[in-house]
Amino acid sequence: MINLLKTRLRQGYRTQAFPPPSNPLPERFRGLPVLHPARCPEGCRACADACPTGAISTDEGLRLDLGRCLFCPACAEACPEGAVEVTRAYGLASASREGLILSGEHLRPKVEALQGEMKRLFGRSLKLRQVSAGGCSGCEADLNVLGTVGFDLGRFGIQFVASPRHADGIVVTGPVTRAMAGALRSTYEAVPAPKLVILSGACALSGGTFTGSPAVAGVPDDVPVDLYIPGCPPHPLTVLDGLLRLLGRLKG
């Protein structure tokens, strides 16, 4: 026991500050893509042809749908003029699905904070039930990481709970297969109103690599979504950034 205590003392304070004073992610991290439309040659489809999910198009100017993006470097590597640049920026969430489509002057997604009664109810304490709706467990694993000492999601008053009856909202991961569609709807209906719905990961946002599969039902149209978090999977910092912006706890 003494040795364990000594080891813990040597390790020191391990929870990282958020927002961090500087970007802590390694150079190899692939975050927000930046578009340079002026560099895109007319008629060139190199980046679009290289994208495995059709997230990028050049038919009506250079456009990128972050909701379909897997954050692979294929488009940047294929573009001969460097019209697509991958950065280390991890703030990717949007309050609307349309906000994830980058083009022209809209080159960064934005989260509108909750207002009024919703902010009063959830601004300081938010309980979430996670629904794994047919995913590969990548998004689920990174959500679990938020509960570790390194990120300590609980210090912000946000916690994952075991029952939708105890939750203020749900976090959906995976493409929502037909086998899981009923379970997702039942979970959503079990959460007391008012409630939030958060989609995390490319599969939940657009189907990801499973787009077009007959086994995929997708998130029902009548389930209102409050926050879209892109990524494959979203980094824990991306999820934390989106949640705190939604709650009005993070500015700028």
Image (spheres, helix red, strand yellow):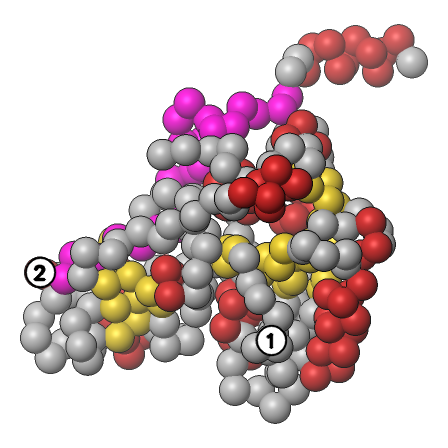
Q: In the drawing, does residue 34 fall left or right of residue 225?
A: left
Q: Amino acid at mark 2?
A: Ala
Q: Nearer the viewer, residue 62 or 116?
A: 116
Q: Position of residue 74 (x, y in %)?
A: 33, 66
Q: Give me the C-alpha separation between circle 1 and circle 2.
A: 39 Å
Q: Which mark is residue 222?
A: 1
Which of marks 2 and 1 precedes in the sequence? 2
Considering every residue shown, the one lying at the far right of the view is 1
Q: In the drawing, does residue 195 fall left or right of residue 88?
A: right
**What residue span does the magenta drawing correspond to?**
14-37
Q: Position of residue 195 (x, y in %)?
A: 67, 55
> Quarter of the image containing the C terminus?
top left
Labels 1 and 2 touching (C-beta < 8 A): no
As helix, strand or loop, the secondary structure at mark 1 comes to loop
Q: Residue at x 77, y 58 (%)?
A: 191
162 lies above or below 6: below
Q: In the drawing, does residue 83 fall left or right of residue 235?
A: left
Residue position marked by numbered label 2 in the rendering = 38
As helix, strand or loop, the secondary structure at mark 2 comes to helix
Q: Residue at x 72, y 50 (%)?
A: 168
Considering every residue shown, the one lying at the far front of the view is 116
Q: Residue at x 91, y 13 (%)?
A: 1
Q: Main secondary structure of the magenta part?
A: loop
Graded by Cα atoms within 10 Å as few (under 14), some (14 to 19) or many (20 or more), the crowding at tag 2 reads few
